[in-house]
Amino acid sequence: MQLSTLDHNTVQQIGKQILNTYRNHCSSFEDASQRLVKDVFASFQSSQKEPEFALLRVFRTLTFEQLTPELQTIAPSKTEQYLTLMGTVGLEEAWCDRHQSKSRKAIQINQNMSPMFKGIFRELGFSWDDSTGDELVSGESLGAMSMIRYFYVEDVSSSTYITDQKTFVKPYGIQSVIAAGSRFITGGAYVVIGFTTVPVTREQAEILVQLTPHISTLLAIFDAQGALWS
């Protein structure tokens, strides 16, 4: 199917299928994250059968103690919290394996985060120890719909939130970015971030983010179990 023709009923069907398929067939938060991004990525193709997502990822907030030994060796501080890559799929083979990520495996949650992650944290109602008082960049297209909070930029080519213009946006034809997520009752939080190769309108984005409750329910199962890593 195509993002441009997506409707509410189809989104509900996709969400229910993901939840019902993987709630009893995954071993961990990481496993569920990887499977769901692969499913969503594969679900959206152009009329020429080209993927409409260039990159789709799940991140989760974790303490240093919750990181794997591998990630602890690259984490610069034991006192920080981290936004940790749990699932990833994209146009490049290296984007389909979290272990091959060069700079996004474990991102410190602080005022030094990239503009995009700061924008995502604000719009989703997350917080961090930010003493700089940074304001939202004016003119960006961000929003919240009902109980589902989301981050959305329609045209990333002119966005100050997306800094990788030369190495990512232009070479891969990135058009829009959408992110949604929520907190868990355990105190952690997750976010799904998608970069599209086709323009996505606000109306289409608001339909797509209705997948969030289904994704949240699936990931909350493994969060509650404390089963983070495969």
Image (cartoon, helix red, strand yellow):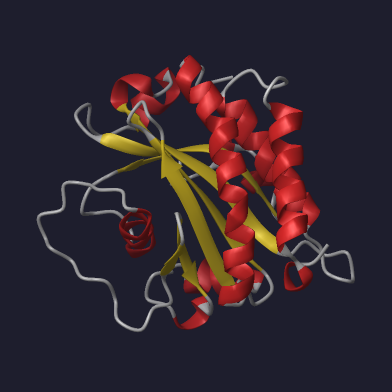
Whether residue 139 is visible: yes
Quadrant containing the C terminus is top right
Measuring 39% from the left and 78% from the top, which residue is drawn there? 140
Measuring 73% from the left and 31% from the top, which residue is drawn there? 20
Location of residue 201 in the rendering, given as x and y in whole percent from the top left corner: 60, 77
Depth order, front residue of 26/166: 26
Q: Is residue 16 above or below residue 124?
A: above
Q: Is residue 102 above or below residue 70?
A: below
Measuring 72% from the left and 38% from the top, which residue is drawn there? 18
Task: Find the residue positioned furthest to the left.
Answer: 131
Q: How many marks?
A: 0
Depth order, front residue of 99/155: 155
Position of residue 181 in the picture relative to residue 12 (left or right): left
Whether residue 163 is visible: no
Location of residue 85 in the rendering, given as x and y in whole percent from the top left corner: 49, 39
Position of residue 53 in the picture relative to residue 65 (left or right): right
Location of residue 107 in the rendering, given as x and y in whole percent from the top left corner: 36, 43
Location of residue 218 in the rendering, given as x and y in whole percent from the top left corner: 60, 32
Residue 71 image-quadrant placement: top left
Measuring 70% from the left and 61% from the top, which residue is drawn there? 8
Residue 142 image-quadrant placement: bottom left
Position of residue 91 in the picture relative to residue 2 (left or right): left
